[in-house]
Image (cartoon, rainbow, N blue to C red):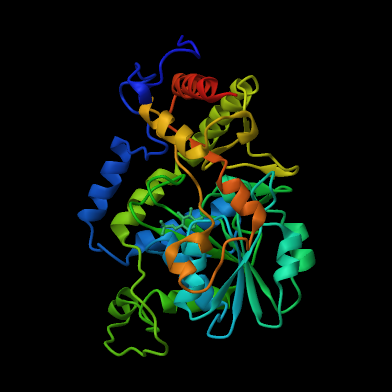
């Protein structure tokens, strides 16, 4: 046990861990490797039967009618904006605290992102702020299930007018639920990512779930250049001709990647359970660590714990988040920060977005710290993180 008074590793002291703990990482076992190897020996490296199978698997997990596999979570957001016919002159409301891709996808379609503020306790998009940002040009609202906790979808549905679409960036929320309804069914369209830090991995990969067949058909076209049939369908029909009916992209997910995704999905329930148990261990241990509190849980949510985020009580500290971050990294703990309000990035600043737009998001950004959380982590790893936090915050306490 390291005393709170021991010298910080940042100042030359002994670090809590000599082998650094990452903030997230994938888990790949022999079965996953065998599944990918089998796909490599099959007739289809890219669009083949495993794409359909992976789509059905994710739709079943979410309880959604259909899903469309694409090459990344970002491609999923782009396809969602395309399916909702977002274009020049349209505004799309997104939360200030999210990964940049949520807002970038609006720009890809020539639309204008409008940033809504977040609830200071949960850091989820604030329905009142959404209400205040609506205009006659609002085409859609994208709710982000930050850290894996679903937004207040009933409150959002109450403020979003008829004719404005509600979409979900559920990239953190595979396996989450709101009032017993699964992520992936809480909006017209929901997007997921299979990046290695997410719940299940395909390397790069993404998916959109929906209950609307016409939206799914539009996204299938969009991921394949805007062409009406794919290579496999033409091979089956013995035909060469196809129609290009719109400008699409190559956003296909390969059979090799889907083989990994299908195999990974078998572990989802167990991994979610591990993430939830580790989060509870953090919750309990942090109760008696000064100057830090976990992001609040709202009622009626089943959290998927993609991230475990805490807020620092800066009033009690003589250091800011950046110093705490550096000190934790020096102790061998892979802390991170999710996220800087998107509009504070230089690209957005250069397009006229100014500080002060979302005060709660900006205030939260000064305080947030993401602690390591992944399914192959142990409770001893949680103990190391809490020990380091106690040591660092003990040192900086006023
Ligand atoms: C990961 C993530 C994305 C993008 O996913 P990629 O697969 O990395 O393109 C989008 N939005 C959120 C909230 C994410 O966490």
The reply to whether residue 356 is in sight is yes
Image vertical order of residue 311 relative to residue 98, above or below: above
Disc tally is 0
Image vertical order of residue 243 relative to residue 211, above or below: below
Locate the C terminus and report the quarter of the image it occupies: top right
The reply to whether residue 217 is in sight is no
Front residue of 173/348: it is 348
Quadrant in which residue 326 is drawn: top left
Residue at (57% x, 41% y) in the render:
367
**Horizontal and vertical percent position of residue 29:** 32, 36
Image vertical order of residue 131 relative to residue 260, above or below: below
Residue at (55% x, 51% y) in the render:
61
**Horizontal and vertical percent position of residue 24:** 41, 38
Left or right of 139? Residue 15 is left
Residue at (58% x, 53% y) in the render:
62
Left or right of 180? Residue 143 is left
Front residue of 350/342: it is 350
**Horizontal and vertical percent position of residue 304:** 57, 42
**Horizontal and vertical percent position of residue 284:** 63, 22
Q: Residue furthest left?
A: 41
Quadrant in which residue 164 is drawn: bottom right
Q: Residue furthest right?
A: 158
Front residue of 263/358: it is 358
């Amino acid at each position: 046990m390291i005393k709170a008074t021991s010298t910080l590793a940042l100042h030359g002291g002994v670090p809590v861990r000599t082998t650094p703990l990452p903030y997230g990482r994938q888990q790949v076992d022999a079965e996953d490797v065998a599944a990918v190897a089998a796909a490599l020996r099959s007739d289809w490296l890219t669009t083949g039967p495993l794409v359909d199978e992976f789509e059905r698997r994710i739709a079943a997990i979410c309880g959604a009618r259909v899903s469309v596999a694409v090459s990344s979570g970002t491609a999923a957001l782009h396809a969602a904006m395309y399916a909702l016919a977002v274009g020049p002159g349209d505004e799309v409301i997104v939360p200030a605290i999210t990964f940049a891709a949520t807002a970038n996808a609006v720009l890809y379609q020539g639309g204008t992102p409008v940033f809504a503020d977040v609830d200071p306790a949960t850091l989820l998009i604030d329905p009142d702020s959404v209400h205040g940002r609506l205009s006659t040009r609002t085409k859609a609202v994208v709710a982000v299930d930050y850290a894996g906790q679903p937004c207040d979808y009933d409150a959002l549905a109450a403020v979003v007018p008829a004719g404005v679409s509600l979409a979900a960036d559920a990239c953190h929320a595979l396996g989450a639920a709101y009032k017993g309804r699964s992520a992936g069914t809480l909006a017209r369209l929901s997007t997921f990512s299979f990046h290695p830090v997410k719940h299940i991995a395909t390397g790069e990969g993404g998916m959109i779930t929906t209950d609307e067949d016409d939206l799914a058909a539009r996204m299938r076209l969009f991921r394949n250049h805007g062409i009406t049939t794919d290579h496999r369908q033409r091979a089956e029909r013995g035909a060469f001709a196809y129609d290009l009916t719109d400008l699409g992209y190559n956003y296909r997910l390969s059979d090799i990647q889907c083989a990994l995704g299908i195999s990974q999905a078998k572990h989802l329930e167990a991994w979610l359970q591990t993430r939830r148990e580790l989060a509870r261990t953090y919750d309990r241990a942090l109760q008696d660590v000064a100057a830090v509190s976990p992001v609040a849980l709202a009622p009626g949510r089943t959290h998927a714990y993609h991230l475990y985020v805490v807020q620092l009580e800066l009033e009690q500290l003589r250091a800011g988040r950046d110093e705490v971050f550096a000190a934790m990294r020096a102790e061998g703990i892979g802390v991170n920060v999710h996220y800087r309000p998107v509009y504070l990035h230089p690209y957005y600043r250069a397009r006229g977005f100014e500080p002060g737009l979302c005060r709660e998001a900006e205030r939260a950004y000064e305080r947030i710290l993401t602690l390591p959380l992944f399914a192959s982590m142990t409770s001893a790893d949680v103990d190391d993180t809490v020990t380091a936090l106690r040591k660092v915050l003990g040192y900086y306490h006023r």
